[in-house]
Amino acid sequence: SDVVLEAKGLTKHFAVRRGLRDLLTREKSAVHAVDDVTVTLRRGRVTALVGESGSGKSTVARLLAQLYPRTAGDIRLHGESVEVKGGRPFRRYVRKVQMIFQDPFASLNPVHTVRYHLTRALKIHGNAGKGSAELEKALQTLLERVQLVPAERYIDKFPHELSGGQRQRVAIARALGANPEALLADEPVSMLDVSIRLGVLNLLRDLKDRLDLAILYITHDIASARYFADETLVMYAGRMVEGGDSETVTQRPAHPYTRLLIESAPDPDRMAAVGPDEVPQDKAGGEPPSLIKPPSGCRFHPRCVHAMPKCSTELPPRFELPDGEDHWAACWLYEITHKPAEPKQEATR
Ligand code: ATP
Ligand code: SF4
Ligand code: MG
């Protein structure tokens, strides 16, 4: 099948200490950063994960990259469950699923050259070939793949001798050194100059096509999701609230939060997507909720103009929507008209 990576019920609660109050109440606090998230990445497709700051996007990426343990959930690569850290499926997984970080400067070691970074990646993952001629060839191929040509111009440079865009290309080349099947790109262009962002996104898209990669593209910017991603998932306060093909989610958003996200984006084109009458006003002034005690029921209910009594007590399941490809929204507005896409979940907070 074309499914590369599948995660279900992905959950991460960070234990935190809140000082005196915890001591007095003997309560353990936790940040409910990610709750019951489902992500499917397919060969040759880009899936965007969109949401405001603190919604849990990076936590999802780090869980998928196995950078820390999950509280709950199942992660599969080609149907094979990745349970135990260090086991064979795990080692295969961390090779096949590579992460690209927001800040290429922080992710490259300033005392080492491009050659060092790429050679190390190739060697760790057993892709350096035999002998120095094969290694040179492999290095050349990596730099060509990320359009840093001629390779000789870049190979012996240190990170500070490169521009931000070139550094991010080196970070992408390093990820490709593992010969991955999936890339997790956490806001890969948000720290770059606006003028070069499109170039890096186009490079990722080109790599996706040439190498048949599955890409998770994390962004604040729902407009770039429409441009760049085949499928778009929207997160709010640690939960997934809407998903579907990017065209439908961005042009005919169903969830009140997605509409707010589009409406608050600074592009006038996007208003046309929703229509001024349907744009819900944000009655709570745009503050995301505390994830230590997340709102009960639908986590968006304190900010939602459509909120009904049950919204604050019952967690809305996904409702399948008839427009678009696999379009769904976790919102009670669609209860009467559409059937749940999965068995009703228990009301939890
Ligand atoms: P941004 O758009 O700003 O990058 P994000 O959507 O990537 O935000 P996350 O970084 O995943 O959000 O954070 C989700 C929530 O989890 C936030 O409330 C954050 O403070 C919390 N969080 C993240 N990492 C930790 C940690 N190691 N310990 C405690 N809380 C954490
Ligand atoms: Fe608003 Fe209720 Fe839908 Fe949540 S479930 S988005 S509160 S209408
Ligand atoms: Mg983040």
Image (cartoon, helix red, strand yellow):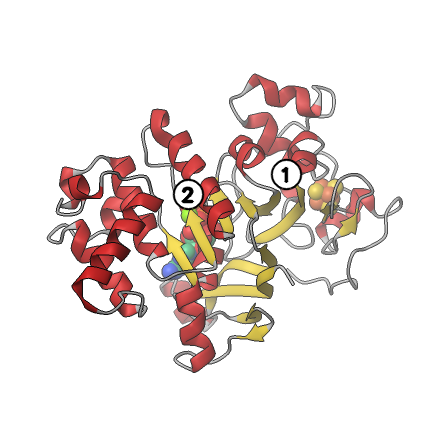
Quote the CA–CA distance across marks 1 and 2. 17 Å
Q: Position of residue 94 (x, y in %)?
A: 40, 68
Query: Dot 1 lies on which element?
Result: helix
Q: Residue at x 43, y 81 (%)?
A: 88
Residue closest to the eye, 108 or 137: 137
Q: Residue at x 31, y 66 (%)?
A: 127
* Circle 2 Cα neighbour tier, 10 Å, few/some/many (<14 / 14–19 / ≥20): many
Q: Position of residue 300 (x, y in %)?
A: 64, 44
Query: Does the Cβ of the disc 2 residue fall within 8 Å of ligand 3?
Result: yes
Q: Residue furthest left?
A: 111
Query: Dot 2 lies on which element?
Result: loop
Q: Residue at x 17, y 53 (%)?
A: 115
Q: Position of residue 341 (x, y in %)?
A: 78, 56
Q: Which tag is nearer the camera, tag 1 or tag 2?
A: 1
Left or right: residue 59 compared with residue 122: right
Q: Amino acid at mark 2?
A: Glu
Residue closest to the eye, 257 or 231: 231
What residue is pinned by disc 1? 246
Residue closest to the eye, 172 or 193: 172
Q: Amino acid at mark 1?
A: Ser
Residue closest to the eye, 215 or 310: 215
Number of numbered discs on residues: 2
Q: Is residue 283 visible?
A: no
What residue is pinned by disc 2? 187
* In the rendered image, the vertical position of residue 289 relative to residue 93, given as above or below: above
Q: Position of residue 328 (x, y in %)?
A: 74, 47
* In the rendered image, the vertical position of residue 291 relative to residue 223, given as above or below: below
